[in-house]
Structures are given as C-alpha cells and as structure tokens.
Image (cartoon, rainbow, N blue to C red):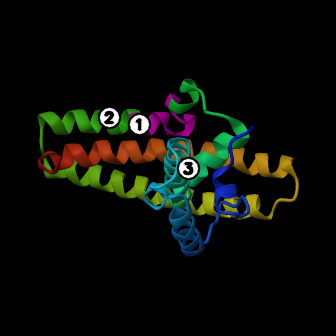
C-alpha cells in the first residue's frame, strides 16, 4: 500500500503556497485523534500504530509548515532527489565572482583593512539582494505550479524552482562564508 502524501494526511490539495493557519488547525485536530496518549488502553499493536501515525503526522506537519521544506518535499515527489553533482555544481554565472570573492577573503585574512572589509560587505549586500530576487522568482513559479492544470506544467515549474533553489542555496552559503570571515567572533 503506497504511503500517504503529507498533503493527504491533512486532506489538503497539493499546493506550494499553503495556508499555514489552516494546516495548523488540521494538525491539532488530527493530533488528538492519533496521539499515543489517547490510546493508552488500546492493544499493543494499536499503540504501535498510533505511535507510528503520530510520528508521521508530526513529520508531515513540520515539512509542510516550512516553505523551503515544503518546496523540497514536492520537488522530490515529482523529480526525485537531485544528484550530488547538481547539489555541488557552481552556477556558471557565479564562477568568476566566486573566485574574486575568495581572493578578497584570502586577502582579508592576511590584511584586515577597512577597504577590504567594505568591499566584502558590499559583495555580501549584492549577494543578499540576488538571493531575495531569486525568492521572488521562486514565488512566481510556486503560483504557476499551483495554477497548473497538467502534470507537465507542474514538472516544468518544479524544474525551474529546483534550479533557482540550488542557486539560492549557493548564494546563501557564500553569504555565510563572508559573514563568518567578517565576524569570526559571531561563530
């Protein structure tokens, strides 16, 4: 028997832009129904089933309430896991910039000048703006997925979202690297 999708647990349509308040309301109602504390007089088999159902319900809720986790979940359902190569591949349009930033970071390690610090802060601000712009593009594609009427259109939107999310994760990692170098005491 195929496992229920996380959306099926809550009797919700499979959408990327989810009403989190409605999800939470349904979670609390279902939690009362499946939680092991409400099945203490049941048989051992029923207690085990209740415990498993409660764990899966909690996992479904934690995944769906978080935008990034929900996106990853739906993408994986449609497209499978990204390959390790996909996860680690530097977006080609960022390669030159990456080398320049790494060079600046290396210089900053040896010469903590205000000029280098200002340049790195500027790079960080630009990267954050690019990450925010990617979020806006992802949001538009989430809407396209939710409005799509064919599996092909849904897959197409998800393939674009995956590319943008991988790039966003890369930018996020680069931003963290800069932050860690500029503020090592914050680690």
10 Å neighbourhood of mark 1: few (<14), some, or many (≥20)?
some
How far across and how far down the image is residue 66, in percent?
50, 59
| Location of residue 46 with respect to 137 vertically, above or below | above
Question: Which residue: 53% across, 29% down?
Answer: 89
State the residue position of label 1.
98
Magenta-drawn segment: 88-98
Q: Nearer the viewer, mark 3 or mark 1?
A: 3
Q: Is 44 colored magenta in this rendering?
A: no
What's the mark number on residue 53?
3
Q: Secondary structure at mark 1?
A: helix
Tell me which residue sits at (74%, 51%) in the image: 157
Q: Pointer 2 and pointer 1: residues touching (CB < 8 Å)?
A: yes
* Residue found 65% across the figure and 57% down from its top: 9
Q: Gap between marks 3 and 1, in whole Å?
A: 46 Å
Q: Residue at x 44, y 46 (%)?
A: 171
Q: Is residue 106 above or below residue 47?
A: above
Disc 2/disc 3 C-alpha distance (Å): 48 Å
| Viewer-side residue, 163 vs 6 | 6
Q: Quadrant of the N terminus?
A: top right
Q: Residues within 10 Å of mark 2 (few under 14, many from 20)?
A: some
Secondary structure mainly formed by the magenta segment: helix
Q: CA distance from mark 2 to mark 1?
A: 6 Å
The residue that disc 2 covers is 102
**Residue furthest to the top:** 85
- Count of labels in the image: 3
For the residue pair 142 and 61, the one nearer the viewer reads as 61
Work out whether residue 131 or residue 63 is closer to the camera in this orientation and state it: 63
Which of the 4 image quarters holds residue 112?
Answer: top left
Q: Point out residue 41 in the picture as x, y percentages from the top left corner.
A: 47, 55
């Amino acid at each position: 028997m195929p496992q229920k999708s996380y959306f099926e647990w809550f009797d919700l349509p499979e959408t990327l832009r989810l009403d989190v308040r409605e999800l939470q309301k349904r979670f609390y109602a279902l939690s009362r129904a499946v939680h092991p504390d409400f099945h203490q007089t049941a048989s051992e088999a029923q207690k085990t089933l209740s415990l498993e159902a409660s764990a899966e319900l909690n996992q479904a809720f934690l995944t769906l309430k978080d935008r990034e986790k929900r996106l990853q979940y739906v993408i994986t359902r449609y497209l499978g896991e990204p390959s390790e190569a996909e996860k680690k591949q530097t977006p080609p349009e960022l390669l030159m910039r990456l080398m320049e930033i790494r060079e600046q970071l290396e210089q900053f390690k040896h010469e903590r000048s205000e000029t280098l610090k200002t340049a790195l802060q500027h790079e960080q601000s630009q990267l954050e703006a690019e990450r925010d712009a990617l979020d806006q593009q992802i949001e538009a594609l989430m809407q396209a997925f939710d409005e799509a009427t064919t599996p092909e259109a849904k897959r197409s939107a998800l393939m674009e979202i995956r590319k943008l999310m991988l790039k966003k994760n890369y930018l996020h990692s680069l931003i963290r690297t800069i932050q860690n170098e500029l503020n090592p005491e914050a680690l």
